[in-house]
Amino acid sequence: MMEKTWRWFGKKDKITLPMLRQIGVEGIVTALHEVPNGEIWTVEAINDLKSYIESYGLRWSVVESLPVCEAIKYAGAEREQLIENYKVSLANLGKCGIRTVCYNFMPVIDWIRTDLQHPWPDGTSSLYYDRIRFAYFDIRILEREGAEKDYTEEELQKVAELDKVITDAEKDALIDTIIVKTQGFVNGNIKEGDK
């Protein structure tokens, strides 16, 4: 059976649960955004958000996501404790009846969008991924060693062409979108209003 779900960023999201219910949403895809990465998601905190969602006639259908800390990925000194915290958090979600957990296990950079408000001809906007702008970020800004090998000659040529015309403001906006907005905010490392 298919369920109509929606990604919701918590109680401070400008899109409210009543709005979502009004358009036919049945299930919510969300997380405990206020809990810092690596800390345990308690039964109390999980049930608090679950009850809040249910008070609007909706269901917490999917956790997006229970973050996998970077120290787990690179085997940092606190790795074993962070793994244990992750296991406890997963068990607590199960105790609260939440059975679907999405997670991303990508090193350094998680999901990527190069534009968070890409305009479309019909007046709408959406998240957007431009491979050439990302390649530019990867090669020219991040300066990842060996990055050039991951792109075609045609893509590398387009990166070179972009390098001739991209402004400092556009570079700053690209960094802000990729690092601050899509990585820090979504993963809980950066909160709304942080510089």
Image: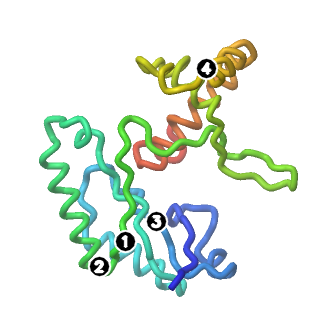
Which residue matches tag 4?
153
Q: How far apart are marks 1 and 2 (CA)?
A: 12 Å
Residue type of the residue flagged with mark 4: Glu
Which residue matches tag 3?
30
Give the residue at x 46% y 41%.
184
Give the residue at x 48% y 68%.
29
Which residue matches tag 2?
96
Residue type of the residue flagged with mark 2: Cys
Q: How far apart are marks 4 and 3 (CA)?
A: 40 Å
Residue type of the residue flagged with mark 3: Thr
Find residue 141 and report its horizontal and vertical position in percent. 53, 20
Q: Nearer the viewer, mark 4 or mark 3?
A: 4
Nearer-N-terminus badge (3/1): 3
Secondary structure type for disc 1? loop
7 versus 73 height, above or below? below
**In the displayed image of the protein, which residue is found farthest to the front?**
153
Task: Compare residues 180 and 111 and report the one nearer the observer.
Answer: 111
Give the residue at x 24% y 64%.
89
Secondary structure type for disc 2? loop
Task: Compare residues 111 and 13 and report the one nearer the observer.
Answer: 111
How is colour applied across the structure in the image? rainbow
Which residue matches tag 1?
100
Residue type of the residue flagged with mark 1: Thr
Residues at marks 4 and 3 touching, judged by CB atoms closer than 8 Å: no
